[in-house]
Amino acid sequence: MKHIPLLLVLAVAACSETSSSSGFRTFTGELVNPVSQSVFEVIPRPASYPSQFWCGAGEYARRELGAASNDSVYVVSEAGPAVTYNSNSAVQFSLLPPGQAQGAQGHRGNWGPKIGDSRFVADASRRCNSNIDRFVP
């Protein structure tokens, strides 16, 4: 009986540490973490399609940043290593155009969305529900 309170404290501590480092997740599983005040990065699930980057960007902009459906979300760093998570595949986005977003890596990648590409938040979020555009970066 004496060990139950200690186990309960350890269990709560473990859960709170896990949830605080997990970042924002879309319902399709993309992880989104802030990089700076104006930049965030989307880390897709393994074997995801390039459109899932847009899914994560649109959902994060809408649900976490409060962006309107007709606000634009911009690519500010192409596919490359994440800076907030151990992953080789992340794209950085901002609600500000490239050059105005502070903290972007500006990485140039070989696949996925390109720096300067933009979508309306609503269009980016729709990528979460679409298999049609899985071949469209």
Image (tube, rainbow, N blue to C red):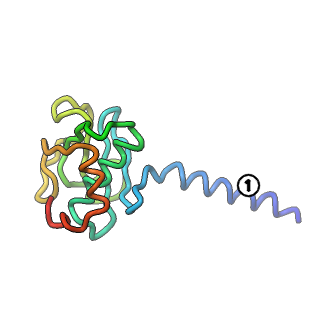
> Which of the two residues, 64 or 17, is positioned nearer the viewer here?
64
Q: Residue furthest right?
A: 1
Q: Is residue 131 above or below residue 109?
A: below
Estimate the x, y position of residue 101 in percent, counting from the top left: 23, 32
Q: Quadrant of residue 128?
A: bottom left
Estimate the x, y position of residue 96 in percent, counting from the top left: 23, 33
> Which of the two residues, 109 or 45, is positioned nearer the viewer here?
45
Estimate the x, y position of residue 97 in percent, counting from the top left: 18, 34
Q: Circle 1: is it few (<14), some (14-19), or many (20+) Cα within 10 Å?
A: few
> Which of the two residues, 68 or 137, is positioned nearer the viewer here?
68
Q: Residue furthest top?
A: 100
Instruction: Report how many numbered discs are placed on residues in the image.
Output: 1
SS at circle 1:
helix
Residue with the mark numbered 1: 9
Q: Quadrant of residue 70?
A: top left
Q: Mark 1 belongs to which amino acid?
A: Val
Q: Residue furthest bottom?
A: 47
Q: Quick one: quadrant of the N terminus?
A: bottom right
Residue plotted at (25% across, 53% down): 54
